[in-house]
Structure formats: structure tokens, C-alpha cells
Image (spheres, rainbow, N blue to C red):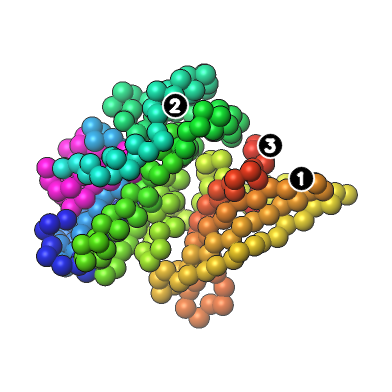
């Protein structure tokens, strides 16, 4: 962060795998084009931040495999580690923040009770991140049961499920979005708040980036839906599920309503909308905070739903989390 004397003209915060890095592009043409653009027009007065779920070990492996630029800041291990510059100096202030009400030993004890959770390699087990592989068909039930067990142990944790394969258990205050918010607070305290910030991501562990106020966003792939349990689906799959569910509430006292709706324009053609979504079937109620990224095209009086992220409100979780609700 010391490279610039004043506020950055632009700060780009980008995920790596399938966002900055296209693994289906063996010649790395897209990445090389970005590199040339950045070095020619932005590096002198802007900041580049990589935000990745990778641990330092496999992040360095990727740097050896792909022609990545050297970022000013690296956020690693799903937002649990922040490092600066080429020498990757750790941010120990962030470490202290994450230590609050975090007990890694208890997390390991509780996760060991689920045979469905297959531990990832030792390199991916970090001081504030415990990581597993979990098959998608089992994910909803496992995530719900695990969250209940950890809550009974009085731990404030966050469970993130990404790409239908990877499950991470982190401190409640961790995550890519919280790491970015922490950096922005530091910039503001130093009088060097970036003039513009752009976040880019593609999966569940990137979703928090789009909830940070006063940042612009680019999401790929288009049309993703993150269920409150952390499981992801493509939007088109959710629409198919809705069609198959037609009539299943017939004869029941079923209703849906929205509360506390707010909207903010985050780009010339993009909006971030937040609301509490309620569902009621007789005496049963459930509710979740819903964040929606919408885009519109000029001369079109319509919006495109690009991304939906839902999080259960405390005490209002659905007992059956195997059913998707839109």
C-alpha cells in the first residue's frame, strides 16, 4: 500500500480461478491482455488486489504456472489472510480481528463427526480456515447439522460452500468481503480511500464482495443463486425447479412477502438490491436476507437478475434445507 502517495484512482479486487485466470485458455491470451492494459494505463496510480480462496502455498503454485502480475495486496484463504507487496508481508492486525471467539480445535472436533466431509490437503488447512470437500447432494443436510453443532459450542463461525465441491469453516468476521471492508477502513483512516473500487468474482466465496458499500462489481458466470445454506445453483436450474414445484402449495395457507427493501446503484448499468424475504405456511415462518445484483441495458425498460445471495436471519431458518426456495 506504500507504493502510492495518495488515494488510488482505481482499486481492482479480483478473484483468480475462472475470473482473472481462465483455465480453459492455455495460451493465457485474456490474462496477457489484462496485464498489458494494467501496466500501460493503471499501474502508476492504481492498486491491484488478488482475492483468492487459495492458500499461500497453492497461490504461489498458480503464480509459477500463469503469467500473473505482482499485486499490491493479496487476500488469501477465503479472506482469512492478507499480505502486502511482492514479499507478502502479513497483516497482523487482521489476524487479531479473526482471533475473536475462534477456536480451531473445536471446529476440528465437530467436523470430524461428519464422514461426508473429506479434508482438503494440509496446505489448505490454515489458522483461521478449516477446509473440506463435500458432495453437492449431501451439502444442505450436512451444512445445517454442522452449523447447529458449532452454535451449541458457542462459536461464531461462517460456513461457505463454493462451486458445489468445497466447504470452508471460518471465523464469523472472516471472508473475502470482510477482508475488503477491513482494507477500506484502513485506507479511510490513512486518508487514502480509493476513488473507485471494482470487485470481480464468480463463486459463493466471492458473493460477499458485492455487498460492500460503494464498490462496483463484475460477476461471472452470469445467473448464479446462493442458497442460505451456502449451496450454489445456476439461475436457470432454479427456474426449472420452480416449474416442477407448480401447485405444491395448493390447499395450504401459503404466502410470500418482502420487507426492508433497499436499492443502490453501483454502476452505470448495475444495481444492488437488498430485502428480507419471508415465507409462511400456516404457523411456520422462515426468512432470509436476500442480496440481488441487477443489470440493465440502455433503451430497455427491464432488469436482468445476475446474482442472488441469501442468508438465513437468526432464528428463522427453514427446518428442511434440502428444498430450494426462490
Is residue 62 left or right of 262 when viewed as pictured?
Answer: left
Which residue range is magenta in the image?
59-88
Task: Identify the residue at horizontal 22%, vertical 56% (top origin).
Answer: 48
User: What is the crowding at mark 3: few (fewer than 14 residues within 10 Å), some, or many (at least 20)?
Assistant: few
Name the secondary structure under disc 3. loop
Q: Is disc 3 in contact with disc 1, using a CB cutoff of under 8 Å? A: no
On screen, residue 97 above or below 255: above
Q: Mark 1 to mark 2: distance in Å?
A: 31 Å
Residue 128 to residue 48: above or below: above
- Does 182 appear in magenta? no
For the N terminus, the quadrant is: bottom left
Q: Distance between the residues labelled 3 and 1?
A: 12 Å
The part of the image, by quadrant, that contains residue 96 is top left
Label whose residue precedes the other's in the sequence (3 or 1): 1
Give the number of the disc on residue 107: 2
Residue 54 image point, x, y percent? 31, 37
95 to the left or right of 316:
left
The residue under label 3 is: 320
Left or right, 147 with reference to 90 = right
The percent coordinates of residue 262 (x first, y second) are 55, 67
Residue 22 visible in the picture: no
- Residue behind mark 1: 284
The residue lying toward the viewer, choosing from 40 and 183, is 183
What crowding class fits label 1: few (fewer than 14 Cα within 10 Å), some (14-19), or many (20 or more)? Answer: few
Amino acid at each position: 500500500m506504500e507504493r502510492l502517495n495518495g488515494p488510488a484512482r482505481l482499486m481492482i479486487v479480483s478473484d483468480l480461478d475462472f475470473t482473472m485466470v481462465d483455465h480453459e485458455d492455455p495460451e493465457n491470451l485474456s490474462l496477457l491482455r489484462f496485464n498489458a492494459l494494467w501496466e500501460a494505463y493503471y499501474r502508476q496510480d492504481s492498486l491491484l488486489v488478488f482475492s483468492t480462496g487459495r492458500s499461500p502455498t497453492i497461490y504461489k503454485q498458480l503464480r509459477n504456472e500463469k503469467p500473473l502480475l505482482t499485486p499490491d495486496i493479496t487476500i488469501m484463504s477465503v479472506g482469512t489472510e492478507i499480505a502486502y507487496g511482492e514479499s507478502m508481508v502479513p497483516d497482523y492486525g487482521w489476524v487479531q480481528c479473526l482471533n475473536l471467539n475462534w477456536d480451531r480445535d473445536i471446529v476440528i472436533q465437530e467436523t470430524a463427526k461428519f464422514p461426508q466431509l473429506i479434508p482438503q490437503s494440509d496446505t489448505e488447512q490454515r489458522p483461521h480456515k478449516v477446509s473440506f470437500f463435500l458432495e453437492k447432494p449431501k451439502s444442505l443436510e450436512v451444512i445445517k447439522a454442522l452449523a447447529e453443532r458449532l452454535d451449541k459450542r458457542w462459536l461464531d463461525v461462517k460456513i461457505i460452500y463454493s462451486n458445489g465441491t468445497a466447504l470452508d469453516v471460518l471465523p464469523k468476521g472472516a471472508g473475502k468481503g470482510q477482508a475488503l471492508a477491513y482494507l477500506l477502513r484502513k485506507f479511510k483512516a490513512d486518508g487514502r480511500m480509493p476513488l473507485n473500487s471494482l470487485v470481480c468474482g464468480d463463486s459463493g466465496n466471492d458473493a460477499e464482495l458485492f455487498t460492500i458499500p460503494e464498490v462496483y462489481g463484475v460477476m461471472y458466470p452470469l445467473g448464479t443463486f446462493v442458497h442460505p445454506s451456502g449451496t450454489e445453483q445456476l439461475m436457470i436450474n432454479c427456474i426449472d425447479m420452480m416449474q416442477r414445484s407448480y401447485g405444491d402449495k395448493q390447499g395450504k395457507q401459503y404466502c410470500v412477502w418482502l420487507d426492508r427493501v433497499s436499492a443502490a446503484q453501483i454502476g452505470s448499468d448495475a444495481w444492488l438490491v437488498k430485502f428480507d424475504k419471508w415465507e409462511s405456511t400456516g404457523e411456520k415462518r422462515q426468512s432470509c436476507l436476500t442480496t440481488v445484483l441487477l443489470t440493465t441495458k440502455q433503451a430497455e425498460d427491464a432488469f436482468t437478475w445476475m446474482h442472488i445471495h441469501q442468508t438465513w436471519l437468526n432464528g428463522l431458518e427453514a427446518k428442511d434445507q434440502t428444498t430450494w426456495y426462490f
